[in-house]
Image: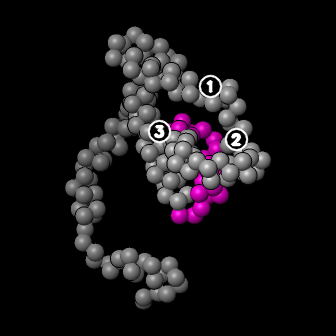
Amino acid sequence: MFKYFYNLLKRRASFKKLGVVLIILFVALAIKLSGLDQYLTLEGLKAYRQTLLEFYQNHRPLVIIIYFLGYVVTTALSIPGAVVMTLAGGALFGLGTGTLIVSFASTIGATIAFLTSRFLLRDWVHTRFGDKLDKVNKGIEETNELLVAMRRRPNIYGLDLKTISRNGQGRHNC
């Protein structure tokens, strides 16, 4: 892995990748050194619950924005504490608003994590696992039409939202 980053420094186009790595390390280090990681525990949430609720009552939009951005960063950097952040969102904002905020923030954070890892590690993964990836890519190319056809197939089994919701309630349409 260190050899990969050393080789990154040799190439001119790789300075962008190095910049992204440095930003990630800086943010993770800042979170750790500032002590913000102590709030990502159940004990921290319990200790500051009343303070958070009072602050939320007085500054709703600000708290929602800060929480949203914090959740995105936590998810994007894969910092342990997403479960506590989710519970905090439900406790602070209620079920409906909390679910909405967490859903969007987690999706954006996961997308950023995916794009960052793809951007940073694509060359390394390809050099390390290239022969295995070639087999996978060849298999996908061969079955691409089948995959597209299966994805776009009509509803031939009668499975629609109505049927699924009925089965979810314990009723079966046999």
Residue 41: x and y in percent read 72, 45
- Is residue 76 shown above or below 166? above
Which residue bears the numbered disc 1? 29
Q: Where residue 142 appears, x then y in whole percent?
A: 24, 49
Determine whether, in the image, residue 121 is placed left or right of residue 39.
left
Q: Give whichever of discs 3 and 2 has the lower sequence position.
A: 2
> Where residue 168 sits in the image (x, y, percent)?
50, 78
Q: Nearer the viewer, mark 2 or mark 1?
A: 2
| Magenta-colored span | 73-96
- Residue in the foreground of this view, choosing between 10 and 104: 104
For label 3, the residue is 113
Identify the residue at horizontal 42%, vertical 89% (top origin). 174
Please say if the residues under marks 2 and 1 sit with CB atoms less than 8 Å apart.
no
Name the amino acid type tagged 1.
Answer: Leu
Query: 6 or 170, which lies in front?
Result: 170
Secondary element at image label 2: helix
**Residue assigned mark 2:** 39
The residue at the point 47 percent across, 87 percent down is 172
Estimate the spatial distance between the alpha carbons at disc 2 and disc 1, rounded to whole Å.
15 Å
Q: Amino acid at mark 2?
A: Tyr
Under tag 3, what secondary structure?
A: helix
